[in-house]
């Protein structure tokens, strides 16, 4: 690993505002302190040193610790962004509604130390929704239930996400964690000395899922809306593809399509989800006016989930890949049957609301 012994352009921004952040109760890691010098001696293997790990992506996101030692995420955002208004709307008006799956906004403030007018948002430390992997059908069904109710809740309140893809669907990993993890390198512990360790089953350690990344969100009545047709990702709905993108589109129908793609990619490798096929097919119809509204998607899904439609044995089943060999299937089935012994007295479908109701120390 190449050891970056100096800060990148993205990183100097955070170093330069570290003092202001400290005054507000947010401490950056050693690498971003004004007088930082690398702890790894020149010529030594650097991956063993936490401060060798530089910031990821475009540099707009960095972690910090609060006064009580809690790890949070700081996100730099343009002051003109409409995403902050949306996060505030769901935080202050609908925070306690269990159907609200918009990432909680813990704090926000202006920063002008560097001459660059920016907002800093403080968000909880989350993790991608499928890391670690799901183990049972019931765990996947719980995920589907939560994201369906979450998007339907946003739509009910006049907000379309506009950029739903796997990286923008997260979970509070705290119930699953045996060790802490590094926010920039989530497969490593916080001190990067080892690999992060998890409990295996969400059935026993239920989690809550959240939506992040509201930069392309549409809010009824808002005048600050970015053009979603300018996104460059594979989750763009057909109506956002050129030349159709020049025409008006329904942002709520785009959400339905994008969420359908997320679910298709999640369940397609497995044999267990025939009962989801029709729902996903309808969500990903080419014609946006033919797609169901999220309220209807929820209604159909809840009917599928009635006890006389889906048996408990189906929910407790392991995820069976379509391409697994007969021998592999037999071995995995035996191992799963053994592990299930410790889960038999728990509901087949996890429910975080019956667990601790906390998000990294914050009541949800």
Image (cartoon, helix red, strand yellow):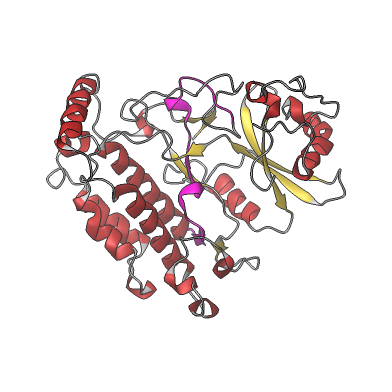
x 47%, y 61%: residue: 234
Whether residue 25 can be seen here:
no
Position in image of residue 306 (x %, y %): 18, 46
x 58%, y 68%: residue: 230
Q: Looking at the image, which is closer to me, 39 or 121?
A: 39
Q: Is residue 37 above or below residue 169?
A: above
Q: Determine if the magenta segment contains residue 123.
A: no
Position in image of residue 124 (x %, y %): 58, 35
Whether residue 144 can be seen here:
yes
Position in image of residue 214 (x %, y %): 57, 54
Q: Locate residue 51 relative to residue 296 in the image: left or right.
A: right
x 36%, y 60%: residue: 294
Q: Looking at the image, which is closer to me, 71 or 347?
A: 71
How many marks the image carries: the answer is: 0
Pick the quarter of the image with the N terminus.
Answer: top right
Quadrant of the rendered image containing residue 181: top right
In the current view of this chain or complex, which residue is farthest to the left? Answer: 308
Q: Determine if the magenta segment contains residue 164.
A: yes
Q: Which residues are magenta?
A: 157-182
Q: Locate residue 108 relative to residue 299 in the image: left or right.
A: right
């Amino acid at each position: 690993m190449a050891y970056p012994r100096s800060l990148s352009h993205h990183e100097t921004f955070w170093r330069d505002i570290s003092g202001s952040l400290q005054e507000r109760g947010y401490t950056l890691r050693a690498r971003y302190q004004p007088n930082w010098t690398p702890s790894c001696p020149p010529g030594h293997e650097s991956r063993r040193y936490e401060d060798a790990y530089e910031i990821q992506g475009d540099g707009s996101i960095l972690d910090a610790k609060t006064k009580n030692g809690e790890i949070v995420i700081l996100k730099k955002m343009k002051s003109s962004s409409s995403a902050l208004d949306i996060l505030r709307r769901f935080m202050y008006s609908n925070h306690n509604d269990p159907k609200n799956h918009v990432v909680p906004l813990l704090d926000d403030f202006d920063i002008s130390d560097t001459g660059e007018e920016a907002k800093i948002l403080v968000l909880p430390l989350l993790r991608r929704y499928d890391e670690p992997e799901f183990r049972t059908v019931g765990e996947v069904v719980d995920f589907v239930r939560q994201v369906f109710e979450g998007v339907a809740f946003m739509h009910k309140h006049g907000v379309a996400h506009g950029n739903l893809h796997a990286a923008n669907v997260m979970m509070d990993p705290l119930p699953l964690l045996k060790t802490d993890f590094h926010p920039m390198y989530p497969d490593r512990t916080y001190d990067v000395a080892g690999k992060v360790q998890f409990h295996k089953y969400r059935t026993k350690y239920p989690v809550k899922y959240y939506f992040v990344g509201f930069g392309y969100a549409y809010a009824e009545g808002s005048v600050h809306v970015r053009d979603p047709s300018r996104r460059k990702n594979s989750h763009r709905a057909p109506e956002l593809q050129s030349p159709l993108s020049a025409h008006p589109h329904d942002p709520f129908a785009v959400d339905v399509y994008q969420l359908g793609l997320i679910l298709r990619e999640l369940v397609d490798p497995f044999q267990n989800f025939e009962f989801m096929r029709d729902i996903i097919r309808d969500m990903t119809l080419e014609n946006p006016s033919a797609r169901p509204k999220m309220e209807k998607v929820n209604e159909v899904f809840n009917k599928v989930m009635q006890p006389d439609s889906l048996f408990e044995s189906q929910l407790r089943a392991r995820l069976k890949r379509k391409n697994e060999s007969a021998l592999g299937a037999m071995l995995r089935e035996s191992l799963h049957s053994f592990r299930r012994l410790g889960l038999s007295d728990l509901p087949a479908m996890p429910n975080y609301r019956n667990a601790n109701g906390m998000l990294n120390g914050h009541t949800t």
